[in-house]
């Protein structure tokens, strides 16, 4: 007997807001599912609901101040439990008070939470610790875990949570690599940095490095996206811009992309830069293991200066290698490739709960 049911028909995605890599990944999943006939509801905080009809939206109040992100995500399921009663899956990048709904939760995690906790400063670590331990406790209750980086694999293995599928984050709109040249006598060397105003991003390392190089008489320019500030002849603060605007600027102007964070899970901005053939310089704790061979690694503030100067000195061969790698990265991290694999695994997981599913008809399972 063939098993020809389509187990995934209704999905609730807890997204919370719009800004940030995790939110963009979840939005990509929403578009992917909707394009395959799945009914999608996106959960958002009340002040984030847009004036459009692309999806059905469910809004919840933000109980605590906005900066308490993890706690607000923890509490949110208490307000949308009615909306998830009849869905097949609940997809989220965070752990919440789901209760019985843990049996339909797909927890998508790109981070080694042990490393993330260790990277926090004292007050932040104190506040995050209850969330961390709650996550550890409920891991065995979660229906399905998507480990979106090899660092996350290590976390789940370390804590004996074996029921995960090893996957990756993905690029929703890869850019075409351009053979951008660098002629010092005609243009400044343009460095692009993307992030939010948070000490964990270590933006000061980048501004100090660029100024140190500029003071040596080298023409260099730093373009900062996501943070407001006072611009000058060396550093330009663009504030928050739409993702398409940032990607277009990187493609047309960036000579190098710098990721300086004290910790990152699986940064979407790095994937986007690499898929555009832009050489990237990354702080070691912020670099996914699977991308270490595609970037230049640095370990401290002085190492960043050395890496930037080396990139300027040997730019043409470095750029040529980056453009060659971009083709493979765009293919491996393309959204449909990644999500086809994930949701086929999810479909098998759901089918195993059905009495008409047997080993003989395993090949007949389809997600939609």
Image (spheres, rainbow, N blue to C red):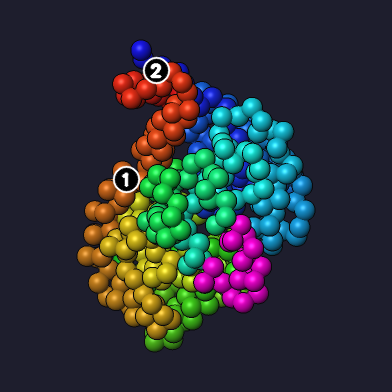
Q: Is residue 355 above or below residue 266?
A: above
The residue located at (34%, 20%) in the rendering is 361
Residue picked out by circle 1: 332
Main SS class of the magenta portion in the image:
helix
Residue 28 visible (yes or no)? no
Label 1: how many residues lie within 10 Å, few (<14), some (14-19) or many (20+)? some
Task: Give me the C-alpha separation between circle 2 and circle 1.
Answer: 30 Å
Residue picked out by circle 2: 3
In which quadrant is the N terminus drawn?
top left
Disc with the residue nearer the chain's start (2 vs 1): 2
Residue 116 visible (yes or no)? yes
295 on left or right of 35: left
Image x and y of residue 304, in percent: 39, 77
267 in magenta: no
Dot 1: element: helix
Residue 3 placement: quadrant:
top left
The residue located at (34%, 76%) in the rendering is 307
Label 2: how many residues lie within 10 Å, few (<14), some (14-19) or many (20+)? some
Image x and y of residue 112, in percent: 46, 61
Mark number, residue 108:
none
Give the residues in magenta: 117-134
Residue 286 placement: quadrant:
bottom left
Image x and y of residue 15, in percent: 61, 45
The residue located at (34%, 71%) in the rendering is 297
């Amino acid at each position: 007997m063939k098993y020809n049911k389509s187990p995934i028909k209704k999905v609730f995605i807890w997204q919370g807001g719009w800004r940030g890599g995790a939110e963009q990944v979840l939005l990509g999943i929403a578009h992917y599912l909707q394009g395959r006939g799945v009914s999608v509801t996106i959960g958002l905080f009340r002040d984030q609901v847009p004036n459009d009809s692309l999806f059905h939206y469910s809004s919840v109040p933000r109980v605590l101040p906005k900066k308490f992100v993890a706690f607000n995500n923890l509490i949110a399921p208490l307000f949308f439990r009615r909306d998830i009663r009849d869905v097949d899956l609940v997809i989220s990048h965070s752990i919440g008070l789901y209760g019985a709904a843990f049996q339909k939760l797909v927890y998508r995690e790109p981070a080694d939470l042990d490393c993330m906790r260790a990277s926090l400063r004292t007050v932040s670590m104190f506040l995050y610790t209850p969330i961390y331990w709650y996550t550890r406790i409920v891991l065995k209750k979660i229906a399905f875990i998507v480990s979106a980086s090899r660092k996350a694999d290590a976390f789940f293995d370390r804590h004996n949570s074996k029921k995960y599928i090893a996957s990756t984050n993905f690029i929703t709109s890869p850019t075409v690599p351009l053979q951008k040249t660098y002629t010092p006598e005609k243009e400044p060397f343009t460095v692009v940095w993307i992030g939010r105003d948070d000490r964990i991003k270590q933006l000061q390392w980048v501004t100090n490095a660029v100024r140190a190089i500029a003071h040596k008489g080298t023409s260099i320019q730093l373009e900062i996206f996501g943070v407001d500030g006072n611009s000058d002849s060396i550093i330009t603060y663009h504030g928050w811009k739409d993702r398409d605007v940032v990607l277009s600027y990187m493609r047309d102007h960036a000579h190098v992309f710098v990721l300086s964070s004290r910790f990152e899970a699986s940064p979407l901005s790095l994937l986007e830069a690499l898929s555009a053939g832009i050489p990237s310089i990354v702080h070691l704790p912020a670099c996914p293991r699977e991308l270490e061979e595609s970037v230049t690694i640095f370990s401290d503030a002085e190492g960043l200066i050395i890496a930037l100067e080396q990139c300027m000195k040997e730019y043409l061969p470095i750029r040529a290698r980056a453009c060659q790698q971009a083709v493979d990265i765009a293919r491996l991290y393309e959204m449909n490739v990644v999500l086809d694999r994930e949701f086929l695994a999810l479909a098998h997981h759901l089918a195993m709960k059905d009495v008409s599913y047997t080993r003989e008809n395993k090949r007949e399972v389809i997600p939609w």
